[in-house]
Image: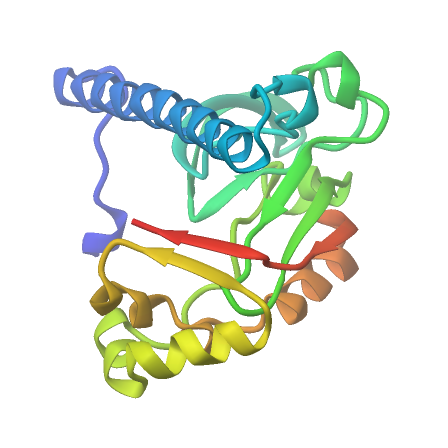
Amino acid sequence: DRQLACLPLDSEDGKAYLAAMACGANFAWANRQMLMHGMRQAFASVFGRKARPKETPLVYDVCHNIAKMEEYEVDGRLQQVCVHRKGATRAFPANHPVLPEKYQAIGQPVLIPGDMGRYSFVLVGAEGSMQQSFGSCCHGAGRRQSRTAAKKSMSSRALLDQLDAKGITVRVHSKNLLTEEAPSAYKDAQKVVNVVHNAGLAKLVARLKPLIVVKG
């Protein structure tokens, strides 16, 4: 089964893979910091005042495509395992030892982005994730259509008009890339979040409304 292909972690190839993954993760962390800085500079420019990090604080920053060595109870005993989260993210509950102090009482923030035309969600990790999913939760609703199919289903002009009617401002490098991320290409994030909440993997905190979309 090709889906079960793997590398022993202590092999030379395994070590090289983990090192390359760490490099990619470090690049992604730094890139998100630059995006945050650019956002603050843009706000400062528009509102005619200096960018103040305290006025636009970072709620949380977490990766969603990475392998981590973590400890879980497996077959009745505590074991160290490699948890590879692909399209998933950590959802540790309150009082988990690796959480920073500010989130010890409530649990790890879990960000589930929706599409550009509907909503996204903030949750916190719940105890059920430790028993059911190795402390993990989905990171998004998932696609209904491939990028190719989405491009064929709607013109960029029609999509821009649709978003404008909802009061959503769009800034995109190429309009040809916009339709691959059309709301209709994605599953309804609200339904996915309801499942996550009811399953006890994470607890719903807030639903966010899109105001601005920036597409590279």
Residue 213, position as x, y percentages in the image = 46, 55
**Above-or-below relation of 68 to 198:** above
Front-most of residues 205 and 160:
160
Determine the residue located farthest toward the front in the rendered image: 48
Q: Which residue is drawn at 30% across and 76% down?
A: 156
Figure quadrant of the N terminus: bottom left
Q: How many marks can you see?
A: 0
> In which quadrant of the rendered view does residue 102 lie?
top right
Q: Which residue is drawn at 29% across and 83% down?
A: 155
Tell me, yes or no, if residue 36 can be seen here.
yes
> In which quadrant of the rendered view does residue 199 lie?
bottom right
Residue 180, position as x, y percentages in the image = 30, 69
Front-most of residues 182 and 19:
182
Q: In this view, does 61 lie to the left or right of 9?
A: right
Q: Is residue 56 left or right of residue 85?
A: right
Determine the residue located farthest toward the bottom in the rendered image: 153
**Above-or-below relation of 30 to 193:** above
**Above-or-below relation of 34 to 202:** above
Q: Residue at x 64, y 28 (%)?
A: 56
Front-most of residues 81 and 177:
177
Tell me, yes or no, if residue 144 can be seen here.
no
Determine the residue located farthest toward the left in the rendered image: 13
Residue 16, position as x, y percentages in the image = 17, 18
Q: Which residue is drawn at 75% across and 32% down?
A: 93
Residue 51, position as x, y percentages in the image = 56, 21
